[in-house]
Amino acid sequence: MNSDQSNLIGTLLAIFGNLLVSIAASIQKYSHVMLAGTKDSRPIYRSKAWWLGFLLTLLGEATVFVSYAFAPVALVAPLSAVSVVASSILGFIFLREKSKPKEFLGRYILVFLGCAFTVAGIYLFVTFGPNSHEQLNAENIIKHVIGWPYLLYLLLEIIAFCLLLYFYKQHNKNSFFVIILLVALLGSVTVITAKAVSGMLVVSIQGSLQISYPIFYIMLVCMVATVIFQATFLSQASCLYDSSLIACVNYILSTAFAIISGAIFYLEFNHEDVLHICMFVLGCAVCFLGVFMITKTKKKAMGFEPYVTMDMMQGIPTIHSKGWVVQPDYNGSFSYGTLVNSDNVAPTLAEAYPAAYAASDLKKD
């Protein structure tokens, strides 16, 4: 199998996998909407439609995972824009996410333009993308890992990650760009390890067993760990910020870091001329612009409203706003709904002057 055939297979697998993921998300959203519109009180995971969406999600992600074995990271990573375009179309047709006539021109025309830009960008970076392909056996993976370009890149990435993690802790987990940059840095490691694991599995299936090498399990553990941490950070961001903003910025930063890491680790652009590289960068930029246009027109969720929680130990009502506690802690000086020890609490007026309050009660009678 030559490089052109391998790239074509990997590209088609990535497109098909991302289409499955977007269809699965639409099916699961449809099941949520249908269940919310009825008096059915059963959990959402007992819905057949939800399970269908879940299985399609697994199949789609597995297909994208396999595509890394055939195509360069620089081709597979940006193709996640396919799911953005497909989700927009399915949301308009299948979920009937329609707006008022006055809003149509301002919203959906921009979405259609964004889809057109995204498709044009995909065509450009697939056409002018890197055409390199190598057999990803354990020996080649080890050679890439110990290469000085990647070791230097890994050192810089670790330093950047530690600094971002420090700011993440200092800002009480509330800085949007710090969270998304952490996700992007982790994602750059995820795509490298995913391509290594996928490539070694494909080589093993073809007859040359690779899963007996320790490097396979090192890459597998790194892949799973980075995916888990990415999900944790994205969950934190989704609780604080709008989902369309997260989708846009995360796609742009994660794709950019994935392309850079693939170029350094797998040397994907070593045999490409300047014209092809410039056209590839232009395609990515056009695709980024299209995704930005699509996500910019998404309806924003309702603003976050403050809510009240009860301290389970002392029964203290605490007001929260955007994840912050905005009501001071009374440290036991105020109770609501529970009995607490109030020996150290200053007495009320009625307790300090019982005679005066008793006299006032007699006058009322």
Image: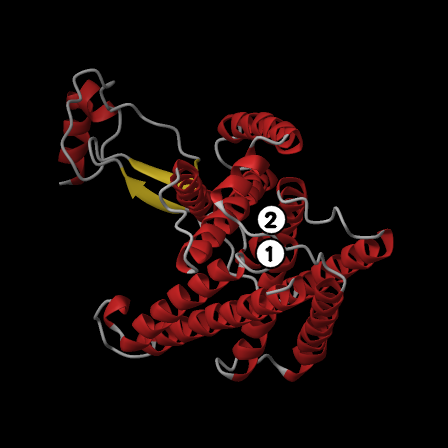
Q: Secondary structure at mark 2?
A: helix
- Residues 85 and 305: in front is 85
> Is the residue 263 above or below the residue 279 in the image?
above
Q: Which residue is mark 1?
A: 77
Question: Crowding near pointer 2: few (<14 within 10 Å), some, many (20+)?
Answer: many
User: Given the current orientation, which residue lies at the most extreme front position?
Assistant: 207
**Picture quarter with the N terminus:** bottom right
For badge 1, the amino acid type reads Ala
- Residues 30 and 98: in front is 30
Q: CA distance from mark 1 to mark 2?
A: 8 Å
What residue is at 22 percent from the left and 71 percent from the top? Answer: 41
**Disc 1 vs disc 2: which is toward the camera?**
1
Q: Earlier in the sequence, mark 1 or mark 2?
A: 1
Could you say where residue 173 lies in the image, as x and y percent from the top left? 49, 35
Q: Which residue is mark 2?
A: 254
Q: What colour scheme has been applied to the protein in the rendered image?
A: secondary structure
For the residues labelled 1 and 2, say whether their Cβ atoms are less than 8 Å apart: yes
**Number of numbered discs on residues:** 2
Q: Secondary structure at mark 1?
A: helix
- Residues 285 and 16: in front is 16
> Is the residue 164 above or below the residue 50 in the image?
above
Could you say where residue 77 lies in the image, as x and y percent from the top left? 60, 56
Could you say where residue 196 lies in the image, as x and y percent from the top left? 50, 47
